[in-house]
Image: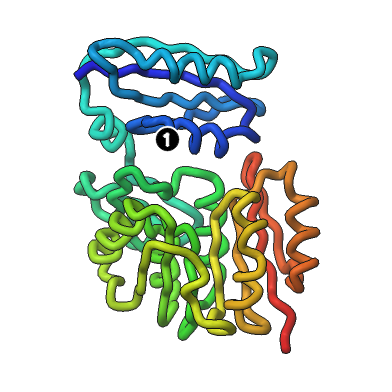
């Protein structure tokens, strides 16, 4: 069936909000294309109604977009399997010094100096291509997680939980509020032979025991961190670590202030393009 392609060019700082809006509006997939400078283009695919675009969707988009900083266009495109097209565009690639990400359709050998992570991302976040995910992977590979109990909040495809297992974590807890994501992650845990070490569920941090986590990795929007600080402080052990990403560089001052107010000491800050990751330690008892 033909689809409606909506292209939306926006300031990068608005990316998360508009991806969420497009998905909630019925998009069957959102492709993010980065350009030089502070703008990105979102390409989103919608079903047609009786062969025509949904006029309410386009009207809502144009009404909410400030004309000075946003651009929107639409076109009807012929029938294709867009999810397959997107999957086919994913190629194996290296991340950091340790990992080699392999989409499951690709029958390629892993370099001998790398640890393979096999992924079927489906519609879950976490193919390893986004800067915030790469920052988390870079940080994880620098830690000896042997014997550690690690919590992955917003697990998406499960990529960070799988990486934690490769770094020696003894027990991994992985949660996501999106049921599709946890189903995808569960399949990826099996593919990577780490399922015995990972407990996963659809939900959030409130299901975790207090003071039970040595490392917590969270790749989330700033607005989600703001709702979860109490839970992070509760579940991370005194002296335990929070690896946090998904934060824009322009938000770094606000985020670091929030961290310190919650009793975390910043150990390290990393930046990749416009994205920030912070490693912070909870104050010892």
Q: Is residue 269 left or right of residue 155?
A: right
Residue 115: x %, y % from top left = 36, 63
Residue 171: x %, y % from top left = 41, 80
Q: Is residue 250 above or below residue 97?
A: above
Q: Is residue 107 above or below residue 85?
A: below
Q: Which residue does the image show at 55% across and 15% down from the upper left?
A: 62
Image quadrant where residue 81 sits: top left
Few, some or many C-alpha atoms within 10 Å of disc 1 (few <14, some 14-19, many ≥20)?
some
Q: Nearer the viewer, residue 236 or 50?
A: 50
Q: Is residue 146 above or below residue 151?
A: below
Farthest residue to the front: give it: 56
Q: Nearer the viewer, residue 205 or 279?
A: 205
Q: Which residue does the image show at 56% across and 82% down from the upper left?
A: 210
Display colour scheme: rainbow
Position of the N terminus by quadrant: top left
Q: Which residue is mark 1?
A: 23
Residue 282: x %, y % from top left = 70, 76
Q: Which residue does the image show at 34% across and 77% down from the upper left?
A: 197
Position of the C terminus by quadrant: bottom right
Q: Is residue 52 left or right of residue 9?
A: left
Q: Is residue 267 left or right of residue 99?
A: right
Q: Is residue 137 above or below residue 82?
A: below
Residue 21: x %, y % from top left = 50, 33
Q: Is residue 139 left or right of residue 267?
A: left
- Mark 1: secondary structure: helix
């Amino acid at each position: 069936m033909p689809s409606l392609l909506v292209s939306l060019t926006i300031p990068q700082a608005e990316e998360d909000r508009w991806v969420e809006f497009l998905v909630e509006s019925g998009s069957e997939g959102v492709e993010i294309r980065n350009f030089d400078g502070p703008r990105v283009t979102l390409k989103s695919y919608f079903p047609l109604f009786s062969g025509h675009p949904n006029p309410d969707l386009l009207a809502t988009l144009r009404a909410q977009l400030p004309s000075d900083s946003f651009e929107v266009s639409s076109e009807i495109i012929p029938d294709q399997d867009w999810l397959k097209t997107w999957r086919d565009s994913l190629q194996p690639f290296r991340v950091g010094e340790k990992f080699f990400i392999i989409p499951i359709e690709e029958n390629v050998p892993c370099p001998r100096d790398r640890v393979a992570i096999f992924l079927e991302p489906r519609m879950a976040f976490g193919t390893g291509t986004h800067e915030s995910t790469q920052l988390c992977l870079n940080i994880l590979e620098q830690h000896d997680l042997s014997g550690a109990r690690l919590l992955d909040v917003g697990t998406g495809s499960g990529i960070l939980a799988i990486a934690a297992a490769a770094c020696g974590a003894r027990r991994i807890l992985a949660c996501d509020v999106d049921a599709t994501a946890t189903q995808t992650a569960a399949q990826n845990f099996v593919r990577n032979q780490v399922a015995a070490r990972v407990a996963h569920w659809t939900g959030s941090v409130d299901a975790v025991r207090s003071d039970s986590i040595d490392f917590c990795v969270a790749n989330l929007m700033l607005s989600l961190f703001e709702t979860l600080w109490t839970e992070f402080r509760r579940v991370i052990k005194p002296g335990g670590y929070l690896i946090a990403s998904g934060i824009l560089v322009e938000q770094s001052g606000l985020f670091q202030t929030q961290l310190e107010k919650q009793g975390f000491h910043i150990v390290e800050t990393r930046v990749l393009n416009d994205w920030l990751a912070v490693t912070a330690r909870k104050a010892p008892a």
